[in-house]
Amino acid sequence: MATYAKTGPGLNHIKAAKATVVKGRTQIAAGEHIALDIQPGMVGGYERQGADLIVRLANGEEIRVTDFYASPEKQSH
């Protein structure tokens, strides 16, 4: 299953953003938001690894959002 992501500085920008295919990893810039095209029931879990967010899907796939957190110590999104 292909997963798509949209990124932008805010909700209105995400709605208008072009979707890109996520192949296990995607990155966002400081201050950006991200939207993945997955339903809540498709998520098996998630965790923080340093500055990255790991989204585990129920089918066993993982999506790593690199630099999701501004620093390993503080939440940013």
Image: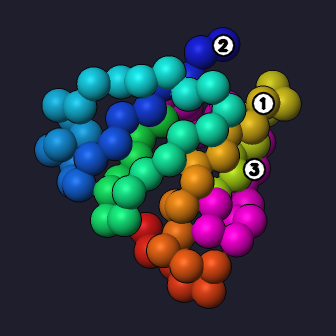
What residue is at 58 percent from the left and 49 percent from the top?
A: 65
Residue 62 seen in render: yes
Camera-near label (2 vs 3) is 2
Question: Where's residue 58, x and y in %?
Answer: 78, 32
Confirm or deny contact between disc 2 and disc 1 (CB under 8 A): yes
Element under label 2? loop
Residue 7 lies in quadrant: top left
What residue is at 40 percent from the left and 47 percent from the top?
A: 34
- The residues tagged by marks 1 and 3 sit, at their Cα atoms, a distance apart of 11 Å
Q: Which residue is mark 2?
A: 1
Task: Give the amino acid type for the residue marked by disc 2 in the picture.
Answer: Met
- The residues tagged by marks 2 and 3 sit, at their Cα atoms, a distance apart of 18 Å
Q: Quadrant of the C terminus?
A: bottom left
Question: Where's residue 5, x and y in %?
Answer: 44, 32
In magenta segment, residue 39: yes
The disc placed on residue 45 is 3
Residue 40 lies in quadrant: top right
What residue is at 36 percent from the left and 24 percent from the top?
A: 19
Q: Earlier in the sequence, mark 2 or mark 3?
A: 2
In magenta segment, residue 49: yes
Q: Earlier in the sequence, mark 1 or mark 3?
A: 3
Residue 43 seen in render: no
Magenta span of residues: 37-52
Question: What colouring style does the render use?
Answer: rainbow
Q: Earlier in the sequence, mark 2 or mark 1?
A: 2
Relative to 51, say whether 62 is above or below.
above
Q: Which residue is mark 1?
A: 61
Question: Where's residue 16, x and y in %?
Answer: 17, 31
Question: Where's residue 44, x and y in %?
Answer: 77, 42
Task: Give the amino acid type for the residue marked by disc 3 in the picture.
Answer: Gly
